Amino acid sequence: MKEKTKPKDYSEYVPDVHFEKIPIKNLVSSQKYQRNLSAHHIQRMVANFDLRQVNLVKVSRRDGVNHIVNGQHTVEAIATISRSRDTPVWCMIYDDLDYTQEADVFANQQKYVKHLNPYEVFKANLEAGNDDQLLIKGLVESYKLAITGQQTPGGICAISTVESIYRNHGFHALDRVLGLCVGTWQGEADSFSANMLRGVAKLVDAFGDTIQDDIFKEKVGHHTARAISRTAKERGDGTYGYAEAMLAIYNQKLKNPLKWSRLHAAKPAPPKPEPSDCLPLLAP
């Protein structure tokens, strides 16, 4: 008779946890390793609440107390939306952690997580059939361009910038920005960098129809996008450096030059550096 094979033990790969619905009022988040609550982040979660996006709250049950290890902003957002701390949330509960182990879990839980980049998020939104991303894709492709994951000729990889222009200024402003970039530099890869797109968007926002597209394309187009990028970096001032470099070229020999004060009229405080959307252009 054939001897039965002993089932393999996978316990060392599976966390020893269980799951419960626990009322928010019975959860504690006062450990010193926790970060301070961000009211801004909570309000963003409330404004964009989607029940399907609610994550499990990670809890350590120690000495009969349910200590939140991860999920304190989720908990506060749900309490705000439901207007009650009696609202239960699904929790993944550890029964065997001490305080130092909790702190270690909190500190290192995101250490090896690969976060989605803007291009991956955009593609997922397309697969979900979300209107904004479908409209952006259609607009980009109407110029014989493509949304790409790395810098390539005829490709736009600064997708978070494109979405920001669409979100903050609207479809028609994005259409004009793309039209100016295509008509001025005929698809030169550097013309679709995040700073170049933002710089053109700032000019469009500041001057509207007082910028004549044909003059912009003719005069600014005498300079390569790469040359304008070099000038902008020499000027400094981030995206405004790009807008200033293009405005200086546009104004040359104009009888009624555009006023620089309009470009800087609503200039915000310097932003924090933003990560690049793009992988570098690969040499052929």
Image (cartoon, helix red, strand yellow):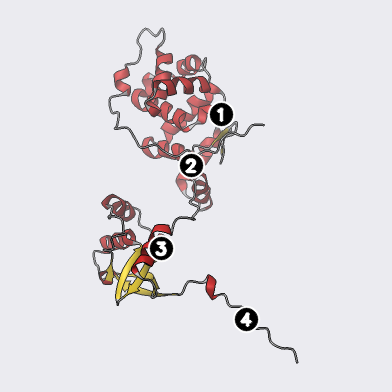
Vertical placement of 237 versus 77: above or below?
above
**Quarter of the rendering containing residue 56:** bottom left
Mark found first going from the N terminus, 1 or 3 = 3
Whichever of callouts 3 and 2 sits on the residue coming sooner in the sequence is: 3
What percent of the width, then of the height, locates residue 159? 49, 39
Q: CA distance from mark 3 to mark 2?
A: 41 Å
- Residue at x 36% of width, y 19% of height: 210
The quarter of the rendered structure image containing the C terminus is: top right
Query: Quadrant location of the N terminus?
Result: bottom right
Residue indicated by mark 2: 135
**For marks 4 and 1 on the same chain, the one whose residue lies earlier in the sequence:** 4
- What is the three-letter code of the residue carrying label 3? Val
Residue located beneath label 3 in the image: 105
Residue type marked 4: Pro
Q: Which residue is under mark 4?
A: 7
Percent across and percent down for residue 46 are 31, 55
Q: CA distance from mark 4 to mark 2?
A: 53 Å
| Amino acid bearing label 2 | Leu
- From the image, state whether disc 2 or disc 1 is nearer to you: 1
* N-term-proximal mark, 3 vs 4: 4
For image coordinates 38% across by 61% down, the residue present is 106
Question: Where's residue 274, x and y in %?
Answer: 41, 38
Instruction: Choose the circle earlier in sequence order: 4 or 2.
Output: 4
Eyeballing the image, is 27 above or below 146?
A: below
Residue 40 versus residue 53: which sits nearer the camera? 40
Which residue does the numbered mark 1 point to in the structure image?
189
Q: Which residue is at the front of the view, 125 or 143?
A: 125
Circle 1: is it few (<14), some (14-19), or many (20+) Cα within 10 Å? some
Q: CA distance from mark 3 to mark 4?
A: 30 Å
